[in-house]
Amino acid sequence: MKRLLVDHHQRIVDYLRVSITDLCNLRCVYCRPPEGLQLVSHEDILRYEEILRVIRVARDLGIKKIRITGGEPLVRRGVLGFIRELINVEGIEDVGLTTNGVLLAAMAKDLKASGLSRINVSLDSLRRDTFKVITGRDNLADVLEGINSAIEVGFNPVKVNVVLLDGINEQDVPHFARLTFEKTIDVRFIERMPFGSEIVPNPPDSFSAQKAVEIIQLKVGKLQPVDSEPLDGPATMFRLNGALGRIGVIDPVTGHFCGTCNRLRLTARGTLRPCLLGPMEIDIKSALRRSASRDELAQIITGAVLAKPIGSICGRGLMKDGMNMIGG
Ligand code: SAM
């Protein structure tokens, strides 16, 4: 009989987001702690075989989908070999990757060949100067090349995730929306969540997903609602008439985000995180390192699922870690 992981609020948890590194090659203003990256020693980061062990046990419990994230997952050595092993884990039906795209152009072909199902690229501006202001780096051309390479090698759609930053990227919204006319991409606008770890004293606020919708309707065209697919996650989906790709909005700040949450997170430091927006982390690394039994690991994973809260604490400024530490 197929096992199901169900939390205290009757949500089925079948999706594990796996951060494979805290390190990143960008320095996004809303993602990094002001004191710089807290260096975690190599020894403290889960080895690939440890991550695969957690995944196999989680699979036995009901996890079917995996997303590899970070930090920036493509900077970790051996990531292609890891993905190939992961794809071969029987019962894992879908493996996706979230990347900032900087190293994607050179790796897209091998990522496709590895069996990876889906790629999300994070990109908050299509203007070079603004990209630099947001990320601290001058890599816009690399990211755009990465997106095109991913399309060329056959990822369809490539999802482009845009974090909405008040006073910074409003004018990018119509440009991103227009890209869906010419490319097989889904552009998804995401409200910035208020973590307590940003690099600047007054980090940019988000503007609302609703405002992004209004900008698009005003400057580009009517957004037709389309049915969301299971793989769209919490996004509300639309299409511009005649477009190849779709447009999505994700509203963790202004919307109701938690009722359908189906995910658990494994951090690179070997903790399970029941909720993106809550501070709780449950250690699984110690158990892995003392070669705990499968049943013990299963109990830790089940405990993390049962610890999932129903509502987020988003907006109360209690999250001290940045996304680089949590795995976005
Ligand atoms: N480096 C990869 C990337 O850029 O996609 C994966 C990790 S990154 C932490 C994952 C996503 O989290 C990115 O799309 C990033 O923009 C998003 N993110 C980081 N901090 C955020 C915040 N405070 N609110 C909303 N999204 C955030």
Image: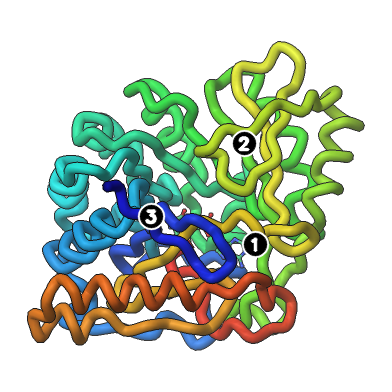
* Residue positioned 59% across, 75% down in the render: 309
Q: From the image, state whether disc 3 or disc 2 is nearer to you.
A: 3
Q: Residue 3 versus residue 142: which sits nearer the camera?
A: 3
Is residue 169 left or right of 298 when viewed as pictured?
A: right
Q: Is residue 297 left or right of residue 160?
A: left
The answer to whether the residue labelled 1 contacts the one labelled 2, judged by CB atoms less than 8 Å apart, is no
Residue type at numbered disc 1? Cys
* Rendered view: 302 above or below 133: below
The secondary element bearing badge 2 is classed as: strand
Return the residue at label 3. 4
Please tell me whether mark 1 sits on a helix, a strand or a loop. Answer: loop
Q: Is the residue under label 2 in contact with that under label 3 (CB below 8 Å)?
A: no
Kindly report which numbered mark, 1 or 2, lies closer to the viewer in this rendering: 1
* Residue 129 is at least partly visible in this image: no
**Mark 2 is on which residue type?**
Val
To which quarter of the image does residue 197 belong? bottom right
Within 10 Å of disc 2 (Cα), the crowding (few <14, some 14-19, many 20+) is many
* Amino acid type, callout 3: Leu
- Give the mark, 1 or 2, whose residue is nearer the N terminus: 2
The picture places residue 69, in percent across and down from the top left corner, at 38, 57
